[in-house]
Image (spheres, helix red, strand yellow):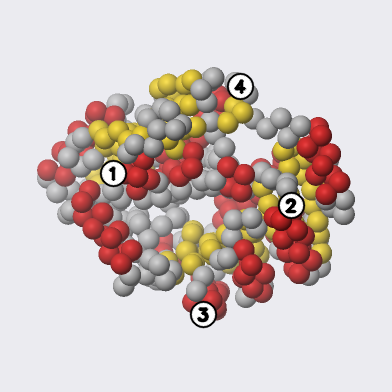
Amino acid sequence: MISPSSPEDLAQALKDGAASRKSISISGNNSKRLMAGPILPAEINISTQNLRRILHYERDDLTLSVEAGMPFSDLQAALRREGQMIALDPPFAASGTIGGVVAANLSGPMRRGFGTARDLCIGMTFATLEGDLVKTGGMVVKNVAGLDMGKLMIGSFGTLAVLTSINFRVHPLPQKTQTFLFSSQEPGPVFTKRDELLRSVLKPLAIDILTPAVAARFSQRGFVLAVRGEGSRSVLARYSRELSDFETLPHGDEETFWAKIQEFTPEFLKRQPNGVVLRISSPLSEMPQVLRCTSDACLARAGSGITYVYLASAHAIAPIWNAARQKKWSVTVDLAPDEVRGSRDLWLSDLCGPDSNTFAMMRRVKSMFDPVGLLNRSRLYGRI
């Protein structure tokens, strides 16, 4: 394992490997090893763990530049001491690096309020197989020059180049927060409340729906709509009036509740070593149908159209896959054991299927950055 201590050393290692046409594996802390395509053996293994410095921080300007190997939890802790945060709450936060979060495009419940890494990254530097360090974007939030190339790196699983540093827009920590829960034995009333909320003037940080199997892990019953409001005392009072038929979660339980939701996927995989997590993207109006097509545990980002389905084994994938194909939903095998990810399609999408123009463009982009196919081989969905 090579662990370069500078971006220049990392770029040189990539150049040397490419010159000898050796396959190269890139990792941070390897916490996302069950995501995307299976990790193939490589002749050169490079870790970013020694790239862990905060390079630049402008507290008043709300901008930050950090090396990709810094543990995500360490970065958040440092910002929290300044009353600020990166507005991402991804799974694997305790074990992952900031580069891994961006390379996998992970997000959590706060996606509703703040978006994903694509919305929060304002620039980055990455190392290419030619040995170059390429900078995109900048340290000014309004500067969008070059961001398109940077956005190619977000969610690319290290198959194009290697992130060495990322520039973020940071946010103040929420003034005050309050969590409201609405439960029902059937999904219909929960989605009715969700729709009313989305039509209201309220702007929650998070809107999640838990099916009964997930809710039971939180000592709740039935289908549960969880809403996290943020703002001044008067804003939270407005939440209480608008959501008068919701239960209010005690303040002392709130952080634990959302931390458990954030890390629900890693905890599920600890309990179910052969488990599979599907991610289904659908229109908001069709999310009730997503829940009806499976009796398995589901956790839905109910304001974003994303549903995570938790399966005890790969045998349960087929009926959900078939239902999604009929409904034209996009489905990704988000996490699964190696033998599952190595033996089946991981991606179902009309826009990005193997015969689509979009997929052909993805192959061309891969060829531009890595024409021989050396870097994190087959990791990106679609085996590229």
Number of marks: 4
Q: Is residue 25 visible?
A: no
* Residue 242 horizontal/vertical position (percent): 83, 49
User: Residue 140, relative to residue 193: is it above or below?
Assistant: above
Query: Is residue 91 found left or right of 38 in the rendered image?
Result: right
Q: Secondary structure at mark 4?
A: loop
* Residue 329 horizontal/vertical position (percent): 51, 70
**Label 3 is placed on what type of residue?**
Gln
Instruction: Report crowding for label 4: few under 14, some 14 to 19, many 20 or more residues within 10 A (C-alpha).
Output: few
Question: To which residue does mark 1 refer?
Answer: 161
Q: CA distance from mark 2 to mark 3?
A: 32 Å
Question: To which residue does mark 2 refer?
Answer: 200
Q: Secondary structure at mark 1?
A: loop
Mark 3 vs mark 1: in front: 3
Query: Residue 81: which numbered mark, if any?
Result: 4
Give the farthest residue toward the left: 20
